[in-house]
Amino acid sequence: METVPQFFRHGPGPFTRLFVFILLSCLLIAEDTRLKYFPQFRQTIGVIIFPLQKIAYIPASIYDQIGEFIASFYLLEENEKLRRIYLDNREQLLKLHALEAENVQLRKLLGAVQQIETATKTKAVLAEILSTPRDPFSHKITLNKGSQHHIQLGQAVIDDQGIVGQITQLYPWSSEVTLLTDKDHSVPVQVVRNSLRSVVSGTGKNDELELRYLSVNTDIQQGDLLVTSGIGGVYPPGIPVAAVLRIERDPTGDFAQIISTPVAGVDRNRQVLVLALVQPESNESQEIPAIEPGKN
């Protein structure tokens, strides 16, 4: 009998194989349900093949890390771009707020100009503060207007609230203002409530003025508004100067210590008004109403 070569031999038929695998599957299901041996076997196999799984996942992990790095790079770039846009917008917003505040201040100054020119027949020139003193013991500021802008020595400087100081140094395109708080500066004033006349002087301290040489029984109260009296012809009459802050009366002394605080301040605005010198009149001066601080 002729034999068939080994590589031409056929195994069991398809139905036989199907039956065997079905039977094997049923046996495995029954064993997994009843005997519980295969879970432990699977765990053992899992422990054995775990390093192989990690090695197999290395290419995918590297691919994911590269994708995350590229994505993070683009996110950082986009974040930096958004940050620049935010800072630009923030800067523009701050400039807008500053311009709004400056516009409000200019409107107040315009109102003060109209009120002062109507009440005192005095012309005013708008000036901008170029520099303020860094030294706490210096009480001088610099303006951007000088002799080329018809500014003169001795002219009064005000803001929308009241007197700021006086021109004491003059240059062609700038000028120097001595503030009220300077210890060598004095302003003739009167009390609005009772028209009491006096002189307020700087103390060399910020936001502090002093009424000197007033007796202990002087009729003055805390909160009284002091305005320029117009005596001397330097300051137009009726412009607010200071408000009485505190009064110390010593019965054993001859004079009361009266401390007031300026109603104006260079730390609250950038623009001021320079007033022309008031020439003294030969005839009797008229009563001029005081300018209320903050009222336009």
Image: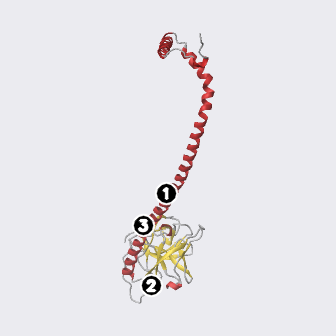
Q: Quadrant of the C terminus?
A: bottom left
Quadrant in which the N terminus is drawn: top right
Could you tell me if residue 219 is visible in this image? no
Query: Which tag is nearer the camera, tag 3 or tag 2?
Result: 3
Colour scheme used in the picture? secondary structure
> Mark 3 highlights which residue?
100
**Inter-mark Cα distance, 2 to 1:** 52 Å
Depth check: 221 or 84 in front?
84
Amino acid on which disc 2 is placed: Val
Q: Which mark is residue 86?
A: 1
The residue that label 2 is drawn on is 278
Numbered circle sitting on residue 234: none
Measuring from the top left, give residue 111's x and y in whole percent: 38, 74
Spatial separation of the CA atoms under disc 1 and disc 3: 21 Å
Left or right position of 282 against 73: left
**Residue occupying image coordinates x 54% and y 66%:** 206
The disc, 3 or 2, on the residue closer to the chain's N-terminal end is 3
**What's the distance in space between the residues labelled 3 and 2, CA to CA?**
33 Å
N-term mark: 2 or 1: 1
Residue type marked 3: Glu
Question: In the structure shown, which secondary structural element does the residue marked by tag 3 occupy?
Answer: helix
